[in-house]
Image (spheres, rainbow, N blue to C red):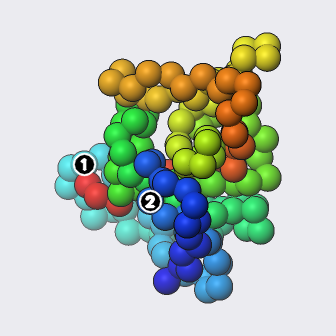
């Protein structure tokens, strides 16, 4: 089970827990060569591809990777829902339109990073939420870029 790092001085509206990712074991599962068409499987599709390692699939840079459990519905427009797990790479630099986890005035938030010239704002992917412009005097730090999202509830 992953260790949970807590940040006692930060309220966490969109990030309920920071999860440290430790690839201590290799768990490989079979990967079928056939695609799933949401119908009945063909008996001819009995062939397996190479084993699929979720560490390789989800983690680009293990020392710089952590995960966060998402809360709130501000990113549902791009398929990130409450309870999902966002995989974050701290080594990736935030580019315009990337999804980031940021610390804004002591609160974590998961939003789309937007930048035009010297102006920076965080954009929700739900029309119920307004953009959050980062103004002079605000404490702001991008903690990392979201590289994957894992749906935890279907």
Q: Position of residue 7 (x, y in %)?
A: 58, 65
Which element is circle 2 on? strand
Of residue 132 and residue 92, the one placed in the foreground of this image is: 132
List the residue tagged with mark 2.
16
Q: Position of residue 43 (x, y in %)?
A: 28, 64
Which element is circle 1 on? loop
Q: Which of the numbered marks, if any, corresponds to residue 50? A: none
Front position among marks 2 and 1: 2
Mark-to-mark CA distance, 2 and 1: 33 Å
Q: Check whether the beta carbons of the residues at disc 2 and disc 1 lie within 8 A of each other.
A: no
List the residue tagged with mark 1.
38
Of residue 118 and residue 95, the one placed in the foreground of this image is: 118
Of residue 141 and residue 61, the one placed in the foreground of this image is: 141
Circle 1 residues within 10 Å: few <14, some 14–19, many ≥20: few
Q: Residue furthest left?
A: 40
The image quarter containing residue 54 is bottom right
């Amino acid at each position: 089970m992953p260790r949970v790092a807590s940040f006692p001085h930060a309220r966490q509206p969109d990030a309920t827990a920071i999860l440290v990712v430790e690839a201590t074991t290799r768990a490989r599962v079979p990967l079928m060569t056939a695609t799933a068409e949401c119908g009945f499987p063909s008996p001819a599709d009995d062939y397996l591809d190479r084993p699929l390692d979720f560490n390789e699939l989800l983690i680009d840079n293990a020392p710089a990777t952590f995960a966060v459990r998402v809360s709130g519905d501000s990113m549902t427009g791009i398929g990130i829902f409450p309870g999902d797990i966002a995989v974050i790479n701290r080594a990736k630099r935030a580019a315009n339109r990337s999804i980031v986890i940021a610390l804004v005035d002591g609160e974590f938030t998961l939003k789309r990073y937007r930048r035009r010239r010297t102006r920076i704002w965080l954009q929700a992917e739900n029309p119920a939420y307004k953009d959050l412009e980062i103004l002079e005097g605000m404490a702001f730090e991008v903690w990392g870029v979201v590289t994957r999202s894992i749906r935890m509830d279907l």
